[in-house]
Protein backbone atom coordinates (compact mmCIF):
# COMPACT_ATOMS: atom_id res chain seq x y z
CA UNK A 1 0.00 0.00 0.00
CA UNK A 2 1.15 3.53 -0.68
CA UNK A 3 0.16 6.71 1.14
CA UNK A 4 0.72 10.24 -0.12
CA UNK A 5 0.57 12.92 2.58
CA UNK A 6 -0.09 16.43 1.32
CA UNK A 7 1.28 18.86 3.87
CA UNK A 8 2.78 22.27 4.51
CA UNK A 9 5.70 22.74 6.85
CA UNK A 10 4.02 25.54 8.83
CA UNK A 11 0.83 23.53 9.38
CA UNK A 12 0.64 22.33 13.01
CA UNK A 13 -2.08 19.84 12.16
CA UNK A 14 0.11 18.36 9.43
CA UNK A 15 2.75 17.60 12.00
CA UNK A 16 0.15 15.93 14.21
CA UNK A 17 -1.28 14.01 11.26
CA UNK A 18 2.17 12.60 10.49
CA UNK A 19 2.74 11.62 14.11
CA UNK A 20 -0.67 9.96 14.24
CA UNK A 21 0.10 8.02 11.05
CA UNK A 22 3.36 6.77 12.55
CA UNK A 23 1.48 5.52 15.58
CA UNK A 24 -1.05 3.80 13.33
CA UNK A 25 1.65 2.17 11.23
CA UNK A 26 3.38 0.89 14.37
CA UNK A 27 0.22 -1.09 15.09
CA UNK A 28 -0.45 -2.12 11.48
CA UNK A 29 -0.01 -5.85 10.91
CA UNK A 30 -0.92 -5.98 7.24
CA UNK A 31 1.04 -5.52 4.05
CA UNK A 32 4.03 -3.15 3.81
CA UNK A 33 3.17 0.55 3.53
CA UNK A 34 5.22 3.19 1.75
CA UNK A 35 4.73 6.87 2.55
CA UNK A 36 5.60 9.99 0.56
CA UNK A 37 5.16 13.57 1.71
CA UNK A 38 3.83 15.86 -1.02
CA UNK A 39 4.16 19.66 -0.89
CA UNK A 40 1.29 22.09 -0.52
CA UNK A 41 1.28 25.83 0.13
CA UNK A 42 -1.28 27.07 2.64
CA UNK A 43 -0.43 30.58 1.46
CA UNK A 44 1.68 30.76 -1.71
CA UNK A 45 1.63 34.57 -1.52
CA UNK A 46 3.87 34.85 1.54
CA UNK A 47 6.95 36.81 0.34
CA UNK A 48 10.44 35.26 0.53
CA UNK A 49 11.24 37.31 3.64
CA UNK A 50 8.05 36.12 5.35
CA UNK A 51 5.60 38.02 7.54
CA UNK A 52 5.69 38.93 11.22
CA UNK A 53 3.95 35.97 12.82
CA UNK A 54 1.44 37.36 15.30
CA UNK A 55 0.13 40.22 13.11
CA UNK A 56 -0.26 37.71 10.27
CA UNK A 57 -2.17 35.27 12.48
CA UNK A 58 -4.39 38.01 13.90
CA UNK A 59 -5.35 39.04 10.39
CA UNK A 60 -5.90 35.44 9.31
CA UNK A 61 -8.29 34.67 12.17
CA UNK A 62 -9.87 38.13 12.44
CA UNK A 63 -13.51 37.92 13.48
CA UNK A 64 -13.37 34.17 14.14
CA UNK A 65 -10.91 33.58 16.97
CA UNK A 66 -7.75 34.89 18.52
CA UNK A 67 -4.39 33.33 17.57
CA UNK A 68 -4.16 31.98 21.11
CA UNK A 69 -7.44 30.12 20.63
CA UNK A 70 -6.18 28.70 17.34
CA UNK A 71 -2.93 27.56 18.95
CA UNK A 72 -4.69 25.77 21.82
CA UNK A 73 -6.04 22.94 19.67
CA UNK A 74 -2.77 21.57 18.28
CA UNK A 75 -0.95 22.34 21.53
CA UNK A 76 -3.31 20.19 23.59
CA UNK A 77 -3.49 17.45 20.95
CA UNK A 78 0.28 17.39 20.80
CA UNK A 79 0.61 16.95 24.56
CA UNK A 80 -1.42 13.75 24.34
CA UNK A 81 1.22 12.11 22.13
CA UNK A 82 4.35 13.85 23.37
CA UNK A 83 4.63 16.46 20.61
CA UNK A 84 5.64 19.96 21.73
CA UNK A 85 4.38 23.26 20.28
CA UNK A 86 5.88 26.58 21.36
CA UNK A 87 3.91 29.14 19.39
CA UNK A 88 5.19 31.80 21.78
CA UNK A 89 8.68 31.38 20.28
CA UNK A 90 7.61 31.83 16.66
CA UNK A 91 8.26 35.30 15.26
CA UNK A 92 8.03 34.67 11.52
CA UNK A 93 5.46 33.20 9.13
CA UNK A 94 7.83 32.02 6.38
CA UNK A 95 7.38 31.25 2.75
CA UNK A 96 7.66 27.44 2.73
CA UNK A 97 9.07 26.84 -0.76
CA UNK A 98 12.65 26.48 0.51
CA UNK A 99 11.65 23.96 3.18
CA UNK A 100 9.77 21.86 0.64
CA UNK A 101 12.78 22.03 -1.67
CA UNK A 102 14.98 20.70 1.13
CA UNK A 103 12.61 17.77 1.58
CA UNK A 104 12.67 17.06 -2.15
CA UNK A 105 16.48 17.25 -2.19
CA UNK A 106 16.83 14.82 0.71
CA UNK A 107 17.58 11.16 -0.07
CA UNK A 108 14.79 8.77 0.83
CA UNK A 109 16.74 7.38 3.78
CA UNK A 110 16.98 10.80 5.44
CA UNK A 111 13.74 12.39 4.28
CA UNK A 112 11.57 11.63 7.29
CA UNK A 113 14.29 12.84 9.63
CA UNK A 114 14.54 16.08 7.64
CA UNK A 115 10.78 16.59 7.73
CA UNK A 116 10.67 16.06 11.46
CA UNK A 117 13.65 18.37 11.88
CA UNK A 118 11.84 21.12 9.98
CA UNK A 119 8.73 20.71 12.10
CA UNK A 120 10.74 20.75 15.33
CA UNK A 121 12.80 23.76 14.31
CA UNK A 122 9.68 25.79 13.60
CA UNK A 123 7.17 24.59 16.17
CA UNK A 124 9.47 23.85 19.11
CA UNK A 125 12.29 26.37 18.67
CA UNK A 126 10.65 29.18 16.70
CA UNK A 127 13.30 29.13 13.98
CA UNK A 128 12.66 30.76 10.61
CA UNK A 129 12.45 27.82 8.20
CA UNK A 130 12.39 30.25 5.31
CA UNK A 131 16.12 30.86 5.83
CA UNK A 132 18.79 28.81 4.07
CA UNK A 133 21.10 28.72 7.10
CA UNK A 134 18.37 27.25 9.29
CA UNK A 135 17.49 24.61 6.71
CA UNK A 136 21.15 23.75 6.10
CA UNK A 137 21.57 23.13 9.83
CA UNK A 138 18.53 20.85 9.81
CA UNK A 139 19.99 18.97 6.86
CA UNK A 140 23.33 18.55 8.63
CA UNK A 141 21.61 17.18 11.74
CA UNK A 142 19.94 14.60 9.48
CA UNK A 143 23.33 13.52 8.15
CA UNK A 144 23.41 15.49 4.90
CA UNK A 145 26.22 17.69 3.58
CA UNK A 146 25.46 21.13 4.99
CA UNK A 147 27.41 23.13 2.41
CA UNK A 148 26.05 21.16 -0.53
CA UNK A 149 22.48 21.66 0.67
CA UNK A 150 23.04 25.38 1.29
CA UNK A 151 24.41 25.78 -2.25
CA UNK A 152 21.50 23.84 -3.74
CA UNK A 153 18.94 25.95 -1.89
CA UNK A 154 20.72 29.16 -2.91
CA UNK A 155 20.19 28.07 -6.51
CA UNK A 156 17.08 26.58 -8.06
CA UNK A 157 17.63 22.89 -7.30
CA UNK A 158 14.34 20.98 -6.86
CA UNK A 159 12.24 24.13 -7.27
CA UNK A 160 10.62 22.96 -10.50
CA UNK A 161 9.83 19.56 -8.96
CA UNK A 162 8.17 21.10 -5.91
CA UNK A 163 6.11 23.57 -7.94
CA UNK A 164 5.01 20.79 -10.30
CA UNK A 165 3.81 18.70 -7.36
CA UNK A 166 1.92 21.66 -5.92
CA UNK A 167 0.22 22.21 -9.27
CA UNK A 168 -0.68 18.54 -9.40
CA UNK A 169 -2.20 18.78 -5.93
CA UNK A 170 -4.31 21.72 -7.07
CA UNK A 171 -5.42 19.78 -10.14
CA UNK A 172 -6.44 16.90 -7.89
CA UNK A 173 -8.58 19.31 -5.89
CA UNK A 174 -6.51 19.44 -2.71
CA UNK A 175 -7.71 22.47 -0.77
CA UNK A 176 -6.52 21.81 2.75
CA UNK A 177 -3.94 19.80 4.60
CA UNK A 178 -3.09 17.37 5.99
CA UNK A 179 -4.62 15.12 3.34
CA UNK A 180 -3.84 11.42 3.18
CA UNK A 181 -4.34 9.63 -0.13
CA UNK A 182 -4.27 5.85 0.16
CA UNK A 183 -3.44 3.77 -2.92
CA UNK A 184 -4.37 6.76 -5.13
CA UNK A 185 -8.02 5.99 -4.44
CA UNK A 186 -9.08 6.96 -0.91
CA UNK A 187 -8.61 10.39 0.67
CA UNK A 188 -8.73 11.28 4.37
CA UNK A 189 -8.60 14.95 5.32
CA UNK A 190 -7.45 16.15 8.71
CA UNK A 191 -5.25 15.07 11.62
CA UNK A 192 -7.35 12.08 12.63
CA UNK A 193 -6.46 9.85 15.59
CA UNK A 194 -4.28 6.80 14.95
CA UNK A 195 -7.24 4.43 15.30
CA UNK A 196 -9.11 6.22 12.52
CA UNK A 197 -6.11 5.95 10.22
CA UNK A 198 -5.62 2.31 11.15
CA UNK A 199 -9.25 1.60 10.28
CA UNK A 200 -8.75 3.37 6.96
CA UNK A 201 -5.82 1.08 6.14
CA UNK A 202 -7.98 -1.95 6.92
CA UNK A 203 -10.81 -0.62 4.76
CA UNK A 204 -8.51 -0.12 1.79
CA UNK A 205 -7.46 -3.76 1.94
CA UNK A 206 -11.00 -5.03 2.52
CA UNK A 207 -12.42 -3.02 -0.37
CA UNK A 208 -9.99 -4.36 -2.94
CA UNK A 209 -11.39 -6.74 -5.51
CA UNK A 210 -9.74 -10.18 -5.77
CA UNK A 211 -8.18 -9.09 -9.06
CA UNK A 212 -6.34 -6.18 -7.45
CA UNK A 213 -5.50 -7.77 -4.13
CA UNK A 214 -3.54 -10.65 -5.64
CA UNK A 215 -3.64 -14.33 -4.89
Image (tube, rainbow, N blue to C red):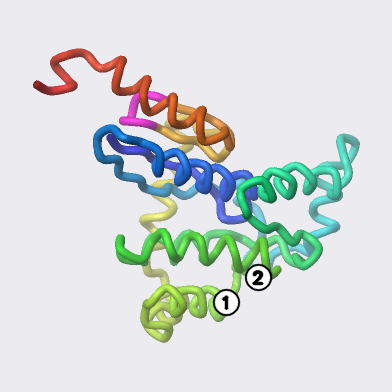
Q: Are marks 1 and 2 in contact (CB under 8 Å)?
A: yes
Left/right of residue 55 with respect to residue 105 in the rendered view: right
Circle 1 sits on which residue? 134
At mark 2, the secondary structure is: loop
Q: Residues within 10 Å of mark 2 (few under 14, many from 20)?
A: many
In reply to whether residue 4 is colored magenta, the answer given is no
Residue at left offset 30%, top offset 38%: 2
What percent of the width, then of the height, locates residue 153? 45, 74
The one of 47 and 77 positioned closer to us in this rendering: 77
Residue at left offset 36%, top offset 47%: 36
Left/right of residue 85 with respect to residue 95 in the rendered view: right
Circle 2 sits on which residue? 128
Residue at left offset 36%, top offset 55%: 161
Asked if residue 66 is positioned above or below residue 117 in the image, the reply reads above
Report the predominant secondary structure element of the magenta stretch. loop
What percent of the width, then of the height, locates residue 179? 50, 36
In this rendering, the count of numbered labels is: 2
Name the disc covering residue 182, or none: none
Mark 1 / mark 2, whichever is N-terminal: 2
Left/right of residue 43 with respect to residue 147 in the rendered view: right
Residue at left offset 30%, top offset 15%: 207
Q: How crowded is mark 1: few (under 14 residues within 10 Å), some or many (20 or more)?
A: some
The part of the image, by quadrant, that contains residue 91 is bottom right
Disc 1 to disc 2, how far (Cα)?
7 Å
Image quadrant in which the C terminus is located = top left
The region drawn magenta spans 182-186
Amino acid sequence: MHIDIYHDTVCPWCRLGWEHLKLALARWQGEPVTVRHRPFFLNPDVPPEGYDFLPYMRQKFAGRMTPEMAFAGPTEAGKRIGVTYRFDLITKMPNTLLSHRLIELSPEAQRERVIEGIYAAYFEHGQDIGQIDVLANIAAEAGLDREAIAAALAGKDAEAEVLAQVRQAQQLGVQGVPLFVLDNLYAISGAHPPETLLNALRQVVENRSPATSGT
